[in-house]
Image: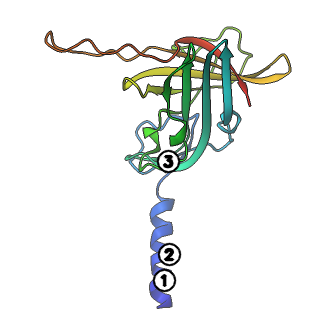
Amino acid sequence: MKKIFYLTLLTSLSIFSQNPIVDITDSELGLPGGYYVKDINNQLDVFEGTYLYTKGNTSFKIILVKKVQQYNGRYYEDLIIGEYQYIENGTEVVNTLNEINTVYNNQRVHNIDGNHIVHNNFRLFRCPECAVGEKRLSGSIKDASTNRYADFCIRRIAENGQEVMKIKIGFVERTFQTADEPTPPEFSLPLGEITLVKQ
């Protein structure tokens, strides 16, 4: 029995050790399936938390959580997942906060996901006001009420003595339909830059 256990353990270790570990800031281009994109320097940690934007009776609440070694169907990765609640003029447009603790086979099913660390000159969301070497998080956000996706970029800074998250949402995916199909619904989440205060 001990021999079988040791043989199984050695086989498992051997298989895992053959899969390379890549830092989230490095390219994994050309690697075989099964590798691990790891947040070696814990750069995703600063983005975790609950954030809130309010203006009058409009609010946007986002919860972000770091997940480690999640399998996405091709490789393992560390990433930020999230959910949100958007209230516009006192009316709740969409609320996915109750899904934050849902464990999916692929955690990228969450309505917010990302692990792409970007710098000032990131072409989708340039940041001339960012400090040299400042790191931001890029990913995607799904409008759960319309099933449309947009890109986002998050910047974590201190502003007026408070920790805030500046999120830019844009580049909503295009939809294609034939002449006899109805026009798809508009993306209902706020676009542009929004500042949310860490709670």
Q: Name the foreground residue: 105 vs 5.
A: 105
Judged left or right of residue 126, residue 4 is left
Furthest residue in direction front, as rendered: 90
Residue assigned mark 3: 102
Q: Earlier in the sequence, mark 2 or mark 3?
A: 2
Element under disc 2: helix
* Amino acid on which disc 2 is placed: Leu
Residue under the image location 50 percent in, 41 percent down? 99
**Gap between marks 1 and 2 measured at Cα:** 6 Å
- Looking at the rendered image, the quarter that the C terminus falls into is top right
**Gap between marks 3 and 1 measured at Cα:** 33 Å
Q: How many marks?
A: 3
* Amino acid on which disc 1 is placed: Phe
Q: Earlier in the sequence, mark 3 or mark 1?
A: 1
Local crowd size for mark 1, using a 10 Å CA cut-off: few (<14), some (14–19), many (≥20): few
* Amino acid on which disc 3 is placed: Thr
Residue 32 in percent (x, y) is at 39, 47
Element under disc 1: helix
The relative height of residue 10 versus residue 1 in the rendered view (above or below) is above
Q: Name the foreground residue: 85 vs 118.
A: 85
Residue assigned mark 2: 9
Furthest residue in direction bottom, as rendered: 1
Local crowd size for mark 3, using a 10 Å CA cut-off: few (<14), some (14–19), many (≥20): few
The reply to whether the C-beta atoms of the residues labelled 3 and 1 are less than 8 Å apart is no
Residue 164 in percent (x, y) is at 73, 23
Judged left or right of residue 46, residue 192 is left
Residue 133 in percent (x, y) is at 71, 22
Residue assigned mark 1: 5
The reply to whether the C-beta atoms of the residues labelled 1 and 2 are less than 8 Å apart is yes
Residue 28 in percent (x, y) is at 47, 38
